[in-house]
Each structure stands twice: as C-alpha cells, then as structure tokens.
Amino acid sequence: MSKQFDVIVIGGGPGGYIAAIRAAQLGFQVACIDEWKNDKGGPAPGGTCTNVGCIPSKALLQSSEHFEHANHHFADHGIKVSDVSIDVAKMIGRKDTVVKQNNDGILYLFKKNKVSFFHGRGSFVKAVDGGYEIQVAGSANETLTGKQIIIATGSNARALPGTPFDEVKVLSNDGALRINAVPKKLALIGSGVIGLEMGSVWRRLGSEVTILEGLPTFLGAVDEQIAKEAKKAFDKQGLKIELGVKVGEIKTTDAGVSVAYTNAKGEALSLDVDKLIVSIGRVPNTIGLNVEAVGLQLDERGAIVVDGDCKTNLPGVWAVGDVVRGPMLAHKAEEEGVAVAERIAGQHGHVNFNTIPWVIYTSPEIAWVGRTEQQLKADGVKYKAGTFPFLANGRARALGDTTGMVKFLADATTDEILGVHIVGPMASELIAEAVVAMEFKASAEDIARICHAHPSLSEATKEAALAVDKRTLNF
Ligand code: FAD
Ligand code: NAI
C-alpha cells in the first residue's frame, strides 16, 4: 500500500525544501524526498547549496578573508600579529560544522511544518488516477502516491570532455571545498562565479593561482565598467586570470596535473599545478528520475521543459530551480518553489525574473540587479548613468576598504531604475535596497531623496542615485 500525499517534492535543495515547507504551510500533506548523504550515510538535506555550494564556499571565503586581514591589513590598524598561520584541517572542519548546522536546521523545519521526509532517490513509477506513483530507494524504501509532484533535482558540475573529476587532483566544486592542504600551485578552468570565489580562497591562503578562461572578455554578463574595476582589483591581489585561452590536453601526473593550453596570442603553453579545479558551468540533473516512465519532456541540455509558471508537459508535475531554465541561483530556486506551492493552492505565486540579484562573494564583492549598460545600449534604451566611488564614502574609509563603486542606470525619460551594479565592500548586502527599489519600480530620484544612515556604505547607493542627476554631494 503506497503512502498518499497531496504534494511530493523530489529534491531537498533550496528549491525543493522551500517548496515543501510552503506547501505544508498552505495546508497540504507533503512529502520531500532527498538522497544527499552526509559522511556517515545519514540524510543531509539542503542540496548543492548547503552541502557543496553557497554555504561551504562562503564559510571558506570568510576564513580565508580573516587570514588575509591578519596577514595584510591588521597592521594598518596598529594591530601587531606575528607567526600567522593557517590550520587547513580546522578551517575545513569549521566549514563542515556550518554545513551540518544547516542540514539539521532543515530537518527541524520539516518537523515543525509537518513535512514527511524520505531519505533516498525518488523516481517515477507511473501515472495513476489523479496523480503519480513515486518510488523511494535508499535509506527509505517506499512507494508514495502524490496528486502533485514538484521536481527540484538541481544540477551537477560540468566536466571537461575526456577529463572526469577524480576529486583528488581534478576537482569539481565538491573536491574544491575539501582540499586539505594549501596547494602550492592551483589552476582553475573558467573564470565564472566558482572560479573567482574558489580562486580567491586559495590565493588568500598562499596558493599561486592561475585561472584559464575561454572567453576573451572578463565576466561578460557583468556591467563592463564594474567588471573592469573588479579585474583591476584581482590583478593587484595577484590572482592571475588568462582570458581567451583554449584548453588542450589535461594529464594527471604523480606530482599533480599538467594543463596544455593555447593563450590569446596563439602560443602553445602548459601549466603544471598541484590541483586543478574545473568550473565551467553546471548541467541540470535528472539522473535516476525515470522520466521515460511518464513521458516528462527534457530539452537538448537535459533541463526539464517548463513554462513561465514552472509547469511541465505533464498535468500536476512542476519543476523548479537549477533543473529548469534560468539562472542557477539558490534564491531563484526558492522563489520558484514558493510560487509553485502557491499556484497548486490556487493562488497567484509570482517570480520577477527582472529583479533577481546576482552576487559574487570575492573581495571586492560584485553584485548587480537589472540590466547592464552594454545591454541597454544593445536594446536601444535611452538611459542616464550615475556612479559613486567608495573612495568618497566615510564608512568605507573607516573600514579601510575603498575599492569600487556603486552605479545606477535609469531611464532617460522616466528616471525608473533599470539596473544597479556594485563592486566593493558588502555589495552583497547593499544590492538588497536596489532590488526592493526596482521591484517597486522606483526612480533614481526616489532613492536620492531617502534618508540613509551616516556613516554607512549605503550612502554610496544614495549618492550614485544622486549622480544620475549629476548632483552628488560628497564627490
Ligand atoms: P540543488 O541544491 O542541487 O538540490 C537538489 C537536491 O536534489 C540535491 O540534494 C540532490 O541530491 C537531490 N536529488 C537529485 N535527484 C534526486 C532524486 N532522484 N531523488 C532524490 N533526491 C534527488 N547560489 C546562490 O544563490 N548563491 C551562492 O552563493 C551560491 N554559491 C554556490 C557555490 C558553489 C560552489 C556552487 C556549486 C553553487 C552555488 N550556488 C549559489 C548555486 C546554488 O547552489 C544552486 O543554484 C542551488 O543549489 C539550486 O537549488 P536546487 O534546489 O534547484 O538544486
Ligand atoms: P559560470 O557559468 O559562472 O562560469 C563558467 C566559466 O567557464 C565561463 O566564464 C565560461 O566562459 C568558462 N568556460 C566554459 N567552458 C570553458 C572551457 N572549455 N575552457 C575555458 N573556460 C571555459 O559557471 P561556474 O563558475 O561553474 O558556476 C556554475 C553556476 O553556479 C554559476 O553560473 C552560478 O549560477 C552558480 N554559482 C553561484 C554563485 C553565487 O551566486 N555567488 C557562486 C558559485 C556558483
């Protein structure tokens, strides 16, 4: 006899666990199935984000930033430290504790919201009258029946053709977060979000880091002016980024890894390193779902085909997060999860794709929402731009971190904010104001007229909004 649910969620990452909680809040009987195992074989809900993504990477970024400050910045404050060293095992152990706290937090939330959790792999068996039969295989071996199914099975790291991850020398994001000693030389392929974040961690801890990027432009999706400013800062830090390369043969040797590549000038070179991190994007994950049993449609990339409301080609089957189109971000997955649960309840859940913020947690941080200047030009939109440098912000000077700027782009006629781009301290937090403003269709003038606390980094946001109308007060 199978267990009956109103909603079955397959995948317990940010898309899945949040969808399950919201559906339970709306009064549904909900099951969430997730197969992630901790090192003892027990459940570890939270998906990529919690286990090998957002959370552990930010834990290591924090530890390595403390190390960098102790080594290079404390002296400016008159703080003398000697013999600064890093205990990598302890740092990794702390990261694992942070991850576990998050896993346990999700299990607690499932209990609190009466979501039934099943640890194992979920797969379609067949469509049944008024729903679908789902099999769970793993720690739990059960057959469940759900009227509505939400698929949130996430994504996996993309490997270079012919170079599988061994997670010892050739690492995906998983192995990159478990390196147990500072590599003398580290190479990364791909200077996207993971390349820059992971490259920063190990550079701060003392590795000689080279990032090989295939495209000729640095961070092509980022506003050009902001990307240029960020690149300047990374160059100064000694993060070596080679653009326009073509990666050739990759050989693992006793000593490490040898990467053959052609640089932008067409010169054939090779790089010998202790470890190689491959961060060239991610692929949607539908492995083991048995989509054929029910005829669930996938696209040519293997992503589940959905409409704007996350509906698949099958009645009562929805999909959210990395396994569908759109940015592969935890908060995007969460918003889709909430919206789908609300749609199942007959409500009007919505996700505004135009106001999804992006953050790269390097130092300086890079954050943005809305369109870039190059996109506005390409779209033929008439706009006004305003920038304000952190160098002219009192709080940034007090912090000793004056790199970067805030940049506003507003419609030339209506003054509506079209994009906000930040490179600098706490950009990840500052961007929230811009997201709220854009969600409420605010004008640059609206932000310029709002009282911001002094001294605070957020004053740079207000000043950049003033700069749109060429009336900055402090620059
Ligand atoms: P996932 O988090 O991948 O979760 C899917 C879950 O489903 C997994 O637990 C998986 O085991 C499970 N599953 C899959 N198939 C089955 C099955 N058949 N049965 C049962 N369970 C199954 N995003 C941000 O917004 N901010 C960040 O700072 C950030 N940092 C990142 C850093 C790294 C190194 C990486 C790799 C990613 C980062 N991301 C970040 C991206 C973020 O992790 C993803 O966008 C997010 O996890 C997607 O959520 P999801 O729920 O769609 O899928
Ligand atoms: P990415 O898409 O951000 O960057 C991949 C980079 O690799 C690109 O610059 C691409 O041009 C380059 N590339 C692709 N193939 C190549 C090749 N053969 N040789 C050389 N360069 C090549 O992907 P990444 O960094 O793997 O991250 C995956 C996703 O995870 C991100 O897109 C993002 O959605 C998410 N993520 C989000 C974070 C955040 O929000 N802070 C942090 C880390 C990941």
Image: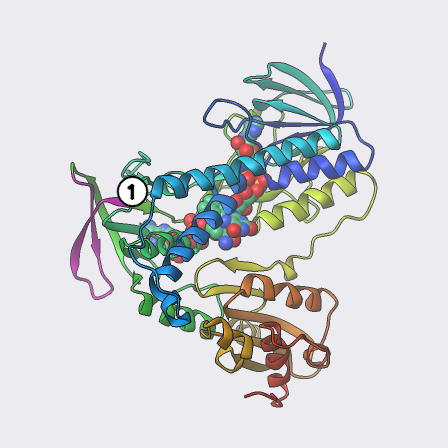
Q: Is residue 133 left or right of residue 174?
A: right
Find residue 174 and report its horizontal and vertical position in percent: 41, 39
Q: Residue at x 46, y 71 (%)?
A: 401
Q: Is residue 441 above or below residue 17?
A: below
Q: Nearer the viewer, residue 12 or 396?
A: 396
**Toward which corner of the image does residue 411 lie, by quadrant?**
bottom right
The residue positioned 69% from the left and 18% from the top of the image is: 144
Closer to us: 200 or 321: 200
Above or below: residue 459 compared with residue 29: below
Q: Position of residue 205 (x, y in %)?
A: 32, 53
Pick the front one: 219 or 331: 331
The residue where tag 1 is placed is 181
Residue 430 sits inside the magenta stretch: no
The residue under the point 73% across, 24% down is: 146
**Residue 217 in view here:** no
- Which range is magenta? 255-275
- Placement of the C terminus among the 4 image quadrants: bottom right
Q: Please, what is the dominant secondary structure of the magenta stretch?
A: strand
Query: Is 95 placed left or right of 212 in the picture?
Result: right
| SS at mark 1 in the image | loop
Q: Residues within 10 Å of mark 1 (few under 14, many from 20)?
A: few
